[in-house]
Image: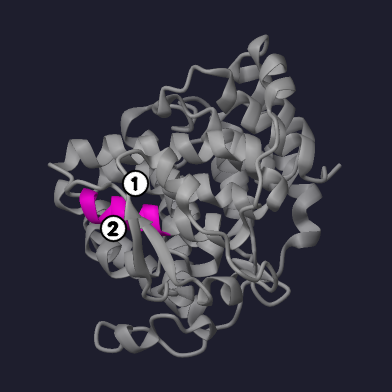
């Protein structure tokens, strides 16, 4: 189901209406991962009005000119082709390890959608290797699941390279030991208006987190899990600020977390730093001044398990609700408290349903 859906989607572009992101590849991977693979083709059929044809080539990306091509959205097709060639020539982990540090400074590219799409693509490739969820069926017509999944990684990395956007330099605003405290200390953007590019350009100060130097890759991974968990829990009480955009304060760092197992351990600490910058930037750009109560939702979440909450998001249908539930309920985060499930229910409550 997943491979067929990806093949359908790879004739479409990563954006529509100028620069709104195509969420379909990410959403269908989340649906399959959450046990709703049987709904994928129907979901894509309903989403097709939000899809545009893939853009035409503009100027070829090469080993000699890639630096000048970075951040040029006219070259989305060229970047995708470039990564398709690289991934056909060598192991995908090697390509990822080469390009991850080059792309990481532009993590907020496309409102963080390219890094999120990369996280979904890498999770699927890892599942292909280990036989985990989303690995593909062993019966039926013979097909190589790696091909559409490698193509999806090429699309994700190409989108990221073409939309690469660095955050402005910001001054330090105190240091914090815990991720939740640091997110609470992120100052709201002075002017809550305009698109994300305009809002990000106005950022001028961030809290420092973690306060102490990270000691080794395992601590970096643990800190990253802490950040994602804090952003998930915060969504339950702050999503009313902008329920769609604030999803990415959690899904972007979780995408980075999902990529870590495919990266050399030396890249884990820089990945943590970039993930914090992305989460804090989205929080600053869209966070409300005051929190809302999540007591009623937590009471509801007490009697629901992960599968039941994800089923609500899948039935809701909105791509952001599906992707946020996929993060909030991610077993890798080890979240057993009802606040995480309540956060997923908050997305279903506040985001307008698709059907």
* Residue 226 spot, x, y in % from top left: 37, 35
Determine whether, in the image, residue 80 is placed left or right of residue 92: right
Is 98 or 341 nearer to us in this picture?
A: 341
Quadrant location, the C terminus: top right
Determine whether, in the image, residue 4 is placed left or right of residue 220: right
Residue 23 marker:
none
Is 266 or 78 nearer to us in this picture?
A: 266
Q: Using the image, determine if residue 100 lies above or below residue 345.
A: below
Considering only order in the chain, which callout, 1 or 2, is on the residue closer to the N terminus?
2
Residue corresponding to mark 1: 259
What SS does tag 1 mark? helix
> Magenta segment, which residues?
268-277
* Residue 240 spot, x, y in % from top left: 72, 46
Determine whether, in the image, residue 137 is placed left or right of residue 351: left
Q: Using the image, determine if residue 4 lies above or below residue 55.
A: above
Is 108 or 190 nearer to us in this picture?
A: 190
Residue corresponding to mark 2: 96
User: From where the camera sits, is residue 121 visible?
Assistant: no
């Amino acid at each position: 189901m997943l491979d067929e859906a990806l093949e359908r989607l790879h004739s479409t572009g990563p954006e529509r209406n100028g620069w709104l992101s195509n969420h379909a590849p990410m959403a269908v991977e989340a649906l399959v991962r959450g046990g709703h693979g049987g709904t994928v083709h129907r979901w894509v059929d309903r989403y097709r009005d939000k899809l545009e044809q893939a853009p035409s080539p503009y100027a070829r990306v090469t080993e000699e000119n890639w630096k000048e091509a970075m951040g040029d959205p006219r070259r989305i097709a060229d970047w995708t082709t470039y990564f398709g060639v690289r991934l056909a020539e060598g192991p995908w982990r090697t390509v990822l390890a080469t390009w991850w540090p080059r792309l990481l400074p532009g993590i907020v590219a496309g409102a963080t959608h390219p890094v999120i799409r990369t996280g979904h693509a890498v999770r699927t490739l890892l599942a292909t290797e280990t036989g985990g969820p989303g690995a593909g069926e062993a019966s039926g017509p013979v097909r190589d699941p790696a091909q559409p999944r490698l193509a999806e990684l090429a699309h994700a990395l190409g989108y990221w390279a073409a939309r690469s956007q660095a955050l402005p330099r910001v001054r330090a605003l105190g240091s914090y030991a815990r991720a939740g405290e640091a997110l609470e200390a992120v100052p709201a953007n002075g002017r809550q208006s305009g698109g994300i590019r305009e809002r990000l350009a106005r950022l001028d100060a961030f809290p420092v987190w973690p306060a102490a130097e990270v000691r080794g890759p395992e601590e970096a991974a643990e800190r990253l899990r802490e950040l994602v968990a804090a952003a998930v829990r915060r969504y339950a009480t702050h999503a009313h600020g902008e329920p769609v955009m604030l999803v990415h304060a959690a899904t972007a760092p979780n995408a980075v977390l999902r990529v870590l197992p495919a990266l050399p351990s030396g890249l884990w600490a820089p990945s943590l730093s970039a993930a914090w910058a992305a989460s804090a930037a989205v929080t600053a750009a869209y966070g409300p001044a005051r929190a809302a109560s999540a007591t009623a939702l937590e009471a509801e979440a007490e009697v629901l398990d992960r599968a039941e909450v994800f089923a609500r998001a899948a039935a809701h249908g909105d791509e952001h609700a599906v992707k946020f539930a996929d993060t909030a309920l991610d077993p890798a985060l080890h979240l057993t408290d009802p606040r995480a499930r309540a956060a997923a229910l908050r997305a279903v409550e506040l985001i307008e349903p698709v059907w």
